[in-house]
Amino acid sequence: DVKVTQSSRYLVKRTGEKVFLECVQDMDHENMFWYRQDPGLGLRLIYFSYDVKMKEKGDIPEGYSVSREKKERFSLILESASTNQTSMYLCASSPAEIQETQYFGPGTRLLVL
Amino acid sequence: AQKITQTQPGMFVQEKEAVTLDCTYDTSDPSYGLFWYKQPSSGEMIFLIYQGSYDQQNATEGRYSLNFQKARKSANLVISASQLGDSAMYFCAMRESYGNNRLAFGKGNQVVVIP
């Protein structure tokens, strides 16, 4: 059974803190993605990676960075958390083929105070 | 420019009735894929159905079918015989062949099934 896990379901951090969100997939997928979801805005792509150590900016990369040192793990880093980064963060992975779906993790609800 | 458009307001649907969720898309890529996902209140995104741009027939998966009208760039989701568990947000998404496998999502449609 396919599985994408995220390190936390709920997270509360203070402004200025460095925040790490971890995502792990066990399907040997090439591609991994980080989205944020806000009411009325749908899912917006922050960063994605199509191979180990490779990363590309999505639509809203400002204030975020990522790391992919191993194929199964893709980390999202908030260098200095701000209140406007309070959101739901979803990680996904997919094989390389165009017809394949992305598989999503359960999401992390981050609150920055 | 927005690649995926979902403009319907929230919908109430009677149990056992069918519901159609609209999705229009914009692309110049001849090879693309269209996806529908369901997101219940728990937050997980659940894949429902896929339609490839070269597929001749409309995709079907159980109670879900996709009304694919390529010339109109439309990919509407039809849920037949609605159940209470169908209450959720529904997202349409598109993957283009030159997009490094990234998905562009619409803003979603809220569906509430009433008994």
Image (cartoon, helix red, strand yellow):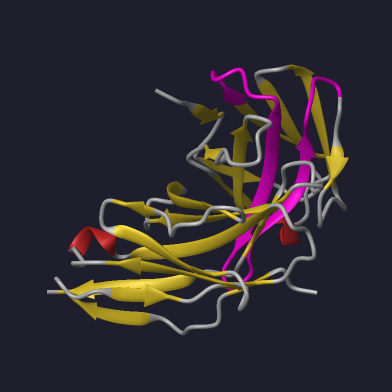
The residue at 55%/31% (across/down) is A6
| Residue B108 spot, x, y in % from top left | 52, 69
Q: Quick one: which residue is furthest to the top in this view?
A: A70
- Closer to the camera in the image, B103 or A78: B103
**Residue A56 showing in the rendered view:** yes
The residue at 47%/48% (across/down) is B45
Task: Please report the bounds of the magenta region as a residue range.
Answer: A24-53
The quadrant of the rendering that contains the C terminus of chain A is bottom right
Vertical order, A17 against B62 (above or below): above
The residue at 72%/55% (across/down) is A85
Vertical order, A110 against B83 (above or below): above
- Closer to the camera in the image, B105 or A15: B105
| Residue B1 spot, x, y in % from top left | 80, 74
Vertical order, B102 against A44 (above or below): above
Q: Kindly report the secondary structure that dominates the magenta region of the rendered protein.
A: strand
The quadrant of the rendering that contains the N terminus of chain A is top left
Number of numbered discs: 0
**Residue A112 showing in the rendered view:** no
Magenta run includes residue A35: yes
**B34 sits left or right of B113 in the view:** right
| Residue B93 spot, x, y in % from top left | 59, 58
Figure quadrant of residue B113: bottom left
**B41 sits left or right of A46 in the view:** left
| Residue A98 spot, x, y in % from top left | 65, 41
The residue at 64%/69% (across/down) is A41
